[in-house]
Image (tube, rainbow, N blue to C red):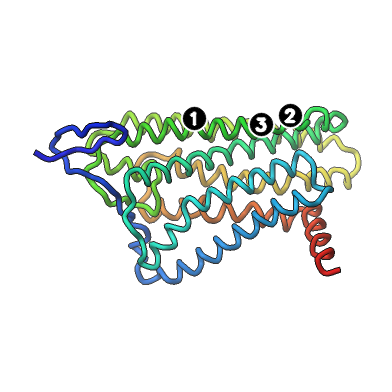
Amino acid sequence: MLLCFRFGNQSMKRENFTLITDFVFQGFSSFHEQQITLFGVFLALYILTLAGNIIIVTIIRIDHHLQTPMYFFLSMLSISETVYTLVVLPRMLSSLVGMSQPISLAGCAMQMFFFVIFGITNCFLLTAMGYDRYVAICNPLRYMVIMNKRVCTQLVVGACSIGLIVAITQVTSVFRLPFCARKVPHFFCDIRPVMKLSCIDTTVNEILTLIISVLVLVVPMGLVFISYVLIISTILKIASAEGRKKAFATCASHLTVVIVHYGCASIAYLKPKSENTRDQDQLISVTYTVITPLLNPVVYTLRNKEVKDALFRAVGQNFS
């Protein structure tokens, strides 16, 4: 009689399943000949992401011109995305050069836990930034009163709390399953690829994942959409063309990040169970684990005049 492992239970129950103590990532095995090239590309993107987000956090902290609610949220988003990439990318890079090691069930659970926390925190931070833009444009005279330090802190704490609650719920539900296979068809411990290794039917877990995905993606997207409907209607009432252009410019960076972030996450988690192949799923995952975190510093640096001016001031002080 073989054994079945149930994560979180103190005892091991005797079943007709094999004891699984660790997982192995299949990674980018379909692209064996291109793995060194992929390693170079992903390493460069990873370094740029880390450098870009660290620069944004540093500039916002040291430049008094950027001590506003909008840039407070931006710095929190940069910190969250920096940790988000640290959870996934180092192990992915090591697997591309043949240095991948098996990951224990506890290690896989921890990776999934932090991935879910910071992924969802990012979603709700973007929602908070949308609300900030709504107040700034639709109620500018009371902006600093409404978006005071206490409110900003509460919004950030709320985003992190939702991420924590969802992560605990998801990881507990996934790792209570018995596992019969150890090869994860992915490059990190994402929810659906790990559930595919279960010995039993996972319909209940799939329904739970879909409900959570709707709550943490569709609801924030809806709130951002409502915010921008009100923002655009207010902007169109501005008499001067220059005023309208300036108002649109303050929202363009945030809107660009929102569209890419929610778009990629929605494709990954709201699509039917087996609509895409493994390679397609990995391509989508690369977009929201590699490209989206890089998009934040790139967009907010290249499209934001205030951040560019702060960078020039900082560089000028260093060389003076």
Q: Secondary structure at mark 1?
A: helix
Work out whether 257 lies above or below 100: above
Does residue 290 appear left or right of residue 185 in this picture?
right
Q: Position of residue 153 (x, y in %)?
A: 69, 33
Residue annotated with mark 1: 165
**In which quarter of the view is residue 270 placed?**
top left
Q: Secondary structure at mark 3?
A: helix
State the CA–CA distance, disc 2 to disc 1. 22 Å
Does residue 5 appear left or right of residue 267 in this picture?
left
Position of the N terminus, as image quadrant, is top left
Assess whether mark 1 and mark 3 are in contact (beta carbons under 8 angstroms). Answer: no
Does residue 95 appear left or right of residue 304 in this picture?
left
Residue annotated with mark 2: 150
Seen at 35% across and 68% down, the residue is: 32
Q: Label 1 is placed on what type of residue?
A: Ile
Q: Label 2 is placed on what type of residue?
A: Arg
Q: What crowding class fits label 2: few (fewer than 14 Cα within 10 Å), some (14-19), or many (20 or more)?
A: few
Seen at 69% across and 37% down, the residue is: 130
Compare marks 3 and 1 and give the one earlier in the sequence: 3
Q: Position of residue 240 (x, y in %)?
A: 91, 43
Compare marks 2 and 1 and give the one earlier in the sequence: 2
Seen at 51% across and 33% down, the residue is: 164
Work out whether 3 lies above or below 148: below
Residue placed furthest toward the right: 240
Assess whether mark 2 and mark 3 are in contact (beta carbons under 8 angstroms). Answer: no
In front of the other: label 3 or label 2? 2
Residue annotated with mark 3: 155
